[in-house]
Amino acid sequence: MVKLLKNLMKSPMFVVGIVIFVLSLLVAVFGPLFYNVDINARDIVAGPYAPSSAEHLLGTDHLGRDYVSLLIAGLRSSLYVGLIAGVIATTIGVFIGLFGGFRGGWIDEVLNMGTNLFIVIPQFVILVLISSAVKEGRSLTLIGLIIGLTSWSWSARSVRAQASSLRSRDHIALAKMNGDGNLKILLKHVLPYLLSYVFMVFIMQVSSGILSEASISMIGLGPLDSTSLGIILNQAKDNGALSDSIWIAFLPATLVITLTVFALYLINTSMEGVFNPRLRK
Amino acid sequence: MNSLKTIAKGTIALSACFGILVGCSGGSEASSDTLPRKETMYLSGQQWGTPGSFNPIAESWNAAWPVGGRFNLMYEPLITYNTLNGQMEPLLGSLVEELSNTDSIVVDLNPAAKWSDGVPVTSKDVKFIFELGHHYSGVAINTSEQITGVNVNVIATVDSASGDTTSKVERLSFMINKNGRNNPLSVKDLLQAIRIVPEHVFSKLIAEHGNSVEEVKKIMMDKNPADGKAPVVSGPYNLDSYSTTKIILKRRDDYWGNAALHNGELPAPKYIVHPIYKSNEHSTIALHDGDLDASMSFVPRIWRKKIAGVHAWLEEPPYFTAGAMPMMMINTQHKPLDNKYFRRAVATAIDYIAIRQFAVSNYTSELEPGLIMPTNLEGKYINKEDCAKYGVNLSLSGQERIDSVQALLKLAGVKSVYNEDGVLDHMEYENGERIKTLFITSPNGWTDWEAMVTIAVESMRKAGLDIREGFVDGGQYWPAMGQGNFDLVMHKPTADVTPSLPWSRFNEVMSSRDWAPLGNWAGTNIGRYNQPGTPEYRPEVDSLLAAVPLMTDSVAIADAYRTLNRIFMEDQVAIPLAYLPEQYYEYSDHVWTNWPNSQNPYAPQQLPWIGSGTKILWNIKLSK
Amino acid sequence: MLKQYPTLRYVLQKGFWYFLTFIVAIAINFALPRLGENNPVDIVMGKAAQGLSPEEAMQKKETLLKAFGMAELDDQGKVVYDTVPEFDANGKAVLDENSKQKMIPQPRLSSGISQFFVYVKNVFHGDFGLSYSQYPKPVIEIIKESLPWTLLIQAPTILLGWIFGNLLGAFAAYKRGIFDKVFFPVAMFLNGIPYFVFGMLLVALFSVTLGWFPAMNAYGMDVIPGFNLAFFKSVGYYYVLPFFSCFPILLSGQATGMRSMAIYELGTDYMKYAKWLGLREGKIISYVFRNAMLPQLTGLAQSLGAMVGGALITEMIFSYPGLGMAMLTAIQQNDYATIQGCTLMISTCVLLANFLVDILIAVFDPRVKAGLQMGGK
């Protein structure tokens, strides 16, 4: 484990990725301690879309609310949704993939068919259908849940591929001979080999969760109970920031969301490089 | 290797295609398939969806611009109302003020008026549309409550110099239904709202469709069903073509009004196009880019667009003259909103200055308490003394406002309960009974209303009122409002500026004439105020509302309005939030110039398609 | 029987599988919007019933129930009515003059199952029902108007993005060095930008600030759609920004994928051997490309869904009159029939595209030719 980390730390991509990501986590969690402006407070003196100033580093939005605090709150919501979606999607994906890949046979066939179904039917479509049906109480958690429940398919597929390659390994056969139950074998002998892989899957799921939430918020089907980066962008767009060229209203949010996802990609790619030595030079 | 070559070839072919596509972008000017920019006026703000019908007798919500609503480019009303000075201006006919009284309203038809197929516009056409609802069921425009019918006399006009009879004029008397509404004011509203349709076309259609108006309403009417050509209209423009992205009207050079009303001149634009944008934002960008000449959509921060040549009626705040009053309607059947002190507390708690600044871009003048707007049409009915004495104090701020709200809550017997952190938790009655959170219903996505509600809720909660935003989909908003399924709801009663204001506003907010219990559909008084038969019932409201339309003495009228406004303030029936224009009016000097504005008010603050705003078309000029 | 024709057998197998998936897609489309209490008749009635008498309203409701296939019909095709007790808005029983429970007739709604079968039958007949918001316009009309625009945006962006992405990725993998060092992080960064955000940036920069390209719509307001040069020119001009708001992101996504794949290929023993043998550079790249191609093709099938979703939102930014825009409008107006129609159409298109890719795989993959890949995917 330590060796692994050491290896990872050698990769500049990983270092950059982890630094950006940890930074964004810190800002999201502890940001309010250092920069505490009520996101509901509107500054009547500054007015709508105020430019950058000492009180408002990134100006104010169309309702006179401080952009920095909105961004902090938005980042927190986006990460929260990403984590929820990531955990759910990874759990389902790993479970289905492991089970199917390890068991093989008709169970695998059925699970595989279900997985393929979700791969082929665009996730965005299902998201739109569900979100537009849930009228009231479309909370942040619910959105995360929906995203998680609809985005597990490709994790399941890649975990399945890995698991089925493990199936024929000797130590598994040995465990089988010992009469260990399937579940025990899975947890004790298969999962540990895939841990790093599962972690990579998780990272990708988090990043896709963040992007999905932004998309769904962008078309006005996002959470009703909180501010997310997607909602900030949607409101800027709906309230004339584009037509008045008020860059400060949408550029920071764009950067925050892109950097966060970028960081996750970096982490993922560098891990891939470490676990798969041939990708290294 | 073959596959690689195939792909490479495909790539080259595709990129070549794309290159051509992009290469086409460099533009040469006008061919026959484009509308020449210098002969075309682009207007927007009315049509947001795919045109559904161009049938003038279909329901207004189903008919597309310029047929639904009050537009007079294709079908014209008898008279138009000038919202600038309150005058009735002639169109197909002219109002004979001196002969109109509380029994009938008299209009002379213009003998020059003709349909596009050459048939003259006669009393037959007028009687057809005004009496359609008297003969058939399912008619969208039904006047049977307002008038008993239209009487026709033919009078001869005499040339004053020669003494010869020049022409015969049809004089129409709209007989007020004394047993119905008995309301000359709303008959005048109808005269400028109902557009006359060609009787010779529609009678035939109705006969062909088994005497069913319902069936005829389903006809698209984008063409004349008889010959498949352009529909028969009387107005200066006719439908040329339409699609999901725009509606194109083409000038009718043989329009009867050019000679009869405009000294033989043609309107300047040959084409009028209504682009169908998907959001306000898009029409704002188009206006900014000079692709759109005028719009009635909400354009935030108009002062930032001056550089791009985009202007409003006024060059400084409030930028527009007020015409409509978005307000929060209160469900007086829901506790504790049935208590007038509680309603007053809610009205007091709102931060009106923040609403003005953030929600409506400073497009409202300072508010007066009451239901009358300080405009030049109705401002004369405001009594400042009463406002100070009975009205809610709109200029409070900070702690003063909170104290004032709390004092009113005490009168209402309601207490705010805070949690340990000092955050408002809920409200309860003095006996400790907990009050459920109240919600302000407002349609999702109407950004200016959303902002108003958000701001109002914030200041309400600060003052100790447990009220929250209740944004709902458009599909739920209308039924909720009609059936009284709300605590507070955003609404704009009497959105149009008509001759009957401010009477119609009082009527729509306070009248108990059609009082409907919760669950039944209410068209007026959706707050269910002043329920007849209850101890709190104030009969003077209804008797005044019935009397005002028949009054002729200006002092008596002013007195009546004063009383009505006082009662409104005492009972806090609803909560007006801002004074916004009837419709927004923003124009660009990019292609067309000489738009009316406060410096050059030759026409009211309206796009050139409605009311007396159409005269803009004859006055507009090309920019250099 | 088909043993001699492994490719055909493979295609038939796939076809059958996609047909099953299509049925499931229909089921999802049918079920999801009915999760909430969304009754189309009430939505249309809310707008249409204003100013109608109770009898007229009842008649209208009957017509609507029939139109939306929601009412139980008797043998003559008439709506079946039940007599039920009336309740007011607060759930209290309404009493008649004799203070007895008042009974009112109420149309009997058909069951979910029978509605489903009607729905499936209609879908196969190309009947997607009537739009609620543009009632009585059929949803299929809306789809017919918008599908071509969606294809116009999506097909070239996905195809070109895939092709150029792969070429670029393979090149970067082979070259490595400074080109790769710059290219790779940039591609990954681009890949992290949501499509719509990139679109917004393009609008703000190239349309509002610089005024070079139009910000919305598919063609100018001054042209009349038809087979004429002015129209095509205008379409081309308006195509630029929407295209470039998807293309770079798609391209970089594919390129990063191809790069990893190609590096992997380059590291294989046969490649080392080939280099050791001193084969020409072009030859090596082409080997790498070819071997990495197949997984990339499968990758395309997998990511089609995601790509399509992203590009749909691009339509919303640019008000491009395709399915995405139709769907957004429908969402705003609570028009479930149209939402359903659009989502089903999108799913169908993605299914078809996937099927096409699978056939391509069958053509390229030697294992299929050898009849080795028999099972599912």
Image (spheres, coloured by chain):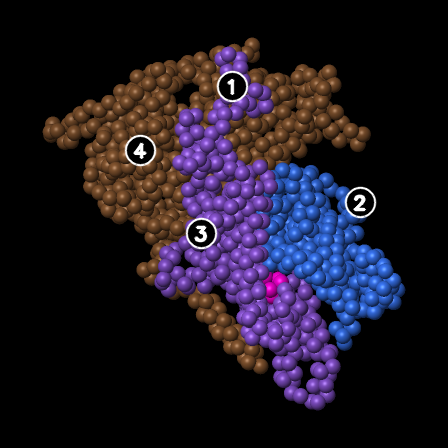
- The outermost residue toward the front is C1
Instruction: Name the quarter where the C terminus of chain C is drawn.
Output: bottom right
The first of marks 1 and 3 along the sequence is 1
The hue used for chain A is blue
Q: Are marks 1 and 2 in contact (CB under 8 Å)?
A: no
Distance of mark 3 from mark 2, alpha carbons?
61 Å
Q: Is residue B226 left or right of residue B15?
A: left
Q: Is residue B521 left or right of residue B132?
A: right
Q: Which mark is residue C102?
A: 1
In magenta, the rendered stretch is C300-304
* Residue B580 appears in view: no
Is label 3 in a helix, a strand or a loop?
loop
Distance of mark 1 from mark 3, alpha carbons?
43 Å
Count of picture labels: 4
Q: Which residue is mark 4?
A: B212
Say if labels 3 and 2 share a chain.
no
Q: Which residue is mark 3?
A: C125
Q: Nearer the viewer, residue A247 or B129?
A: B129
Q: Nearer the viewer, mark 1 or mark 2?
A: 1
Splitting the image into 4 quarters, where does residue C19 fall? bottom right
Q: Which mark is residue A33?
A: 2
Q: Which mark is residue B295?
A: none
Of all chains in the rendering, the one displayed in brown is B
